[in-house]
Image (cartoon, rainbow, N blue to C red):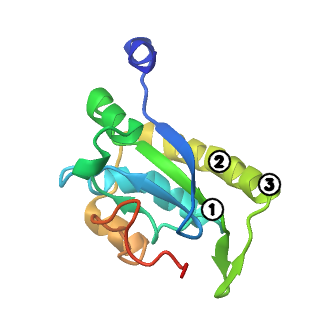
Amino acid sequence: MIKEMQKNRNLIFYCDLHGHSRKKNAFFYGNATKESAVETRIFPMILSKMSKYVSFEDSRFAVQKAKESTARIALWRELGIDNVFTLEGSFYGYIQDKKTIPFTAEDFINIGKDMCKALFIYVTQVTMKGTSPSKEVFEKSFSGKVGKEEGGDDDEKSGFP
């Protein structure tokens, strides 16, 4: 169905929404190659700057062998677009002022609203203008935080015992 839609429309974005049982915050899993390292991080960075619930630092951009069958990687390969993500929302909560705050239904609604606003900004400011920031501009604009290449669903500190 998605492949058929792409024949008639310029598909530029796909995002699965999942819950995560071990890490805190909301964060992205994305795909990246050396050629698309900056482009694939632009939307997650925009959303992380707009939403207190979304952590760019917790996001990961890698194509792991064990994850080849996921919709995220399969669609990224099939469609050939940079913006194919999984947005994970912790079942536990988000970190604010070094404290863990449980997510509420309203928090998830706000993430959705912020996601729509970020997508509008991405489409109107990046896609429609046909420009993409260079790696240097991106790093300078966002304090050099370009996310991590390594890691996956079970990576590093989850914040749980």
Q: Which residue is mark 1?
A: 50
Where residue 98 sits: x, y (%)? 64, 88
Q: Badge 2, how many Cα within 10 Å: few under 14, some, many 20+?
A: some
- Indicate which disc, 3 or 1, sits on the residue closer to the N terminus: 1
Question: Distance from label 3 to label 1 (Cα)?
Answer: 18 Å
Specify which label sits upstream in the sequence, 2 or 3: 3
Point out the tag, 2 or 1, that comes first from the N-terminus: 1
Q: Position of residue 101 (x, y in %)?
A: 73, 75
Cβ atoms at labels 3 and 1 below 8 Å apart: no
Q: What residue lies at 62% left-to-right and 62% top-to-bottom?
A: 50
Amino acid carrying mark 1 in the image? Met
Secondary structure, mark 2, is helix
Report which residue position mark 2 lands on.
117
User: In the picture provided, is 53 more to the left or to the right than 144?
Assistant: right
Q: Is residue 11 placed above or below 86 in the rendered structure?
A: above
Neighbour tally class for label 3: few under 14, some 14-19, many 20 plus, Cα within 10 Å: few
Measure the C-alpha gap from mark 2 to mark 1.
9 Å
- Say if 103 sits above or below 158 in the image: above
Name the element at disc 1: helix
Residue reaching furthest to the left: 34
Image quarter for residue 72? Answer: top left
Query: Percent from the top left, x then y, of residue 6?
Result: 40, 18
Q: Nearer the viewer, mark 3 or mark 1?
A: 3
- In the image, residue 5 above or below residue 41: above
Kindly check if marks 2 and 1 are in contact, taking CB atoms under 8 A apart as contact: yes
Q: Which residue is drawn at the image coordinates 39% and 65% (left, top)? A: 154
Image quarter where the C terminus lies is: bottom right
Q: Secondary structure at mark 3?
A: helix
Q: Amino acid at mark 3?
A: Ala
- Percent from the top left, x then y, of residue 121? 56, 47
Q: Which residue is mark 3?
A: 105
What residue is shown at x 53% (from left), y 79% (from top)? Answer: 159
